[in-house]
Every structure is written in structure tokens, then in C-alpha cells.
Amino acid sequence: MEVIIRPGDTLSYFSSLFRLPLNLIVDSNPNINPDKLNAADKIQLPGYVTVPYTIKEGDNFWIIADAKKLTVDTLLLLNQKKEEDQLKVGETIFVPEKMVTPFITSKSPCDYKSLVKLINNFIRVYPFIAVNTIGSSVLGNPIQEIKIGKGAKKIHMNASFHANEWITTIVLMSLVNKYLLSLTNGALMKGIQAIQLYNEVELSIVPMVNPDGVDLVLNGPRSNLRDHVMEINEGSDDFIHWKANINGIDLNNQFPANWDICKKNKQKKAPAPRDFPGAAPLTEPEAVAMVDLAKNNLFDCVIAFHTQGEEFYWGYEGFEPLESENLAKEFERVSGYRAIRYVNSHAGYKDWFIQEFKRPGFTLELGKGINPLPLSQFPKILKCAEGIFLAALNH
């Protein structure tokens, strides 16, 4: 919500007036000097939107403020050109409304276009976040990273490496939305102060690593790609079980962590809907973007959201630090998922991260069944995932 500064206004006053943490206001306005505000400058207040209100007979700012459970000065701030004692029936003023409900629901799948819309809504209402483009997909779709928080500890989470695991994007973005709401509403998340996590942790989120693949599964192929992907799909126009990127390469088999062993073990020797690791590691732009992201940020912990199995994997070839086992026990406790140290698998993102940085990395297998998991599983999956999400931020 944008407001115009008046003479004498301070960010501390806005913090009190709108019941917002001061640092969220400061971080929402990186180009403003908090100690030297200029009248008539515009600033952003997070967690609020403005809604129109039509004046009725007998209305004044005091009556409206009382009815809306607001202070009068919030109305005066948003309606500076209105004379407070000369409101006319039928004219429109603007009223601040605090966001208390999430943007995202589990009622429908989330394709790339829906994700972009959701991210833009986050930027509009929660301007203290940062959104960066870390690379592009094969088809040129920007792969976006959301950053939240200013803490020294760096945690990264990602979703939809695999196209038919698109439900992981909804889960991760729902957790982010709940976190943002908790920050601006002063709410607890399972007894934890969200603002404390914000001050201690820089959270990095890549909600859709494989946008081309997700769109293929949910929307079918573009007309100019139909023959290409049907050939990879053995002539079928049913893409519901497609895991790979649009080139038919499994992005979670693309990383230089014993990639040769992965290649040897895979039955697929050419582009396929799943399980083909490519002709070499890091041939695909999506995988390169994720490697560059980790190298540029030196995350303390990485968590990749996948489906299915109600379990998670936390070790790789003995490279995992002692801290990983403690985290695994906590994740197991809060989620009910089974912790598995080693599986006969290589070339995955968490494998490469653990090998490269010797820091905790996890692959979560959310839910149980046949991919893509139905949205009916969403509430249960979200509850389990929230425990892990908060444990990772709070460890």
C-alpha cells in the first residue's frame, strides 16, 4: 500500500499506526532514508491494500474509522486531499485493509502463468521481499527466486524440479504466503515469532525449477512443439506422467555428483519423459541456473521439495556434516516422515550440494501415491511440510 509522507511523519510512527514491524517498513523502502523523510515522498507499507469506500449519509472519518476498527489518522493519511468535515454522500474515499487471507489456494493446479501472477501479488503487498531472475528455461521462461529476510543464516528451498510434481510449487508457495502473513500480522507460526525468523534467516525460494515441464503436464504442448514432445513421449499425447524438462532430460539427474554412475544405471539412453540424465551433466539451462544460485549464495542448508513417499533423504556418500543428522531427526519428529540417510541415487541437486559444500541438504518426498498426486492430499501434505519448513528456519 502506497502512502504519501506528510510533514512530521516518521517510519516509527507508521510502524505504530499500522502495527507493523519497523524493519519490514524500512526493508520495503530501500531507496528511502529512514532518518530523513521528505514530505510528499511516497512510501510502501507492507501487508495492506487500499479499498474504495462510498460515503453514506451521516458518515465522517471518525464514524468510518470506528466501524472499520481503524484509527482516524489512517484514513486522513490515505485521503489527504479530502476535507475531513466536508465529505459528500456518494463520493469515494480509500480505506486501508490488512491482508489476513492467503493469495494461493489448493483448488486448482499452478502453472507458470499462475505462479508469475502470484509472485507479482507478493511483490505488490509484501515489498520487503526481493525477486530475482536466476536464469531461464529452455523455452525462455524466467526462473525466479524469492528472497525473504535479512539474517546471516541462508536457507534455500525449491520445488517442481519434476514436471508432474507441480503440487510441490503450491505447497512451497503456500508456506511462503503463510510466513508473509505471519510477519505482517504479528502472528506466531507453531509458537515461533515470524519476525524473529526474518531477522535471523535469509530465505531463498525457487518455486518452479522446471516451468516448461509443468506447463506441458498441465496445459499440453505448444503447437510448434507438439511433434517434438510427442516423439519423446513415444507417440502419446498424454503428458500427465512427464517428469523431464521440455528437452526430455530429467533435471534432477543433471548434476555433477557421480553423474557417470547415474548415466550407467539409467535404462533411458535418449530423451524421454523421465529418467534420462542427458548427454553430460549441466547441459540444461535450468540445472545451470540452480548450480550458479548455490555457488553465488553459499547456502547453509538446501531443501528440495519432491513427491512422493512420505520420507526424505539427507545423506550423500559420507559428505554430509554431523549437523545433518540432528536436522533429520527434527524433520522426522515434526513431519512424521521417515528419515533415510542413503539411497542408491546420484546426480541429484541435494547430492551435488552436499558433495560440493559439505553442508546439510535434503530431498523431501511429500505425500504418497502415484504422481501427480491429487490436490485432495494437499492439506495433509501442507501440514507435514510446514513442520519441516519452520524447523529448517529455526534450527
Image (cartoon, rainbow, N blue to C red):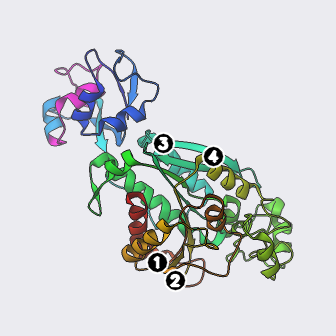
- Quick one: label 3, few (<14), some, or many (20+) residues within 10 Å? some
| Magenta-colored segment: predominant secondary structure | loop
Q: Nearer the viewer, mark 2 or mark 3?
A: 2
Q: Amino acid at mark 2?
A: Lys
Disc 1 target residue = 377
- Residue 289, percent from left and from top: 69, 52
Residue 123 bears which disc, if any?
Answer: 3
Q: Earlier in the sequence, mark 1 or mark 4?
A: 4
Q: Earlier in the sequence, mark 3 or mark 1?
A: 3
Against 95, residue 206 (above or below) is below
Q: Nearer the viewer, mark 1 or mark 4?
A: 4
Query: Marks 4 and 2, how far apart in space?
Result: 34 Å
Q: Secondary structure at mark 1?
A: helix
Query: Marks 4 and 3, how far apart in space?
Result: 23 Å
Query: Marks 3 and 1, how far apart in space?
Result: 29 Å
Q: Amino acid at mark 4?
A: Asn
Q: Amino acid at mark 1?
A: Gln
- Closest to the observer, 203 or 41: 203
**267 inside magenta stretch:** no
- Residue 387, percent from left and from top: 38, 68
- Splitting the image into 4 quarters, where does residue 102 fall? bottom left
Write the residue at 59% across / 77% down.
372
Q: Earlier in the sequence, mark 4 or mark 3?
A: 3
Disc 2 target residue = 368
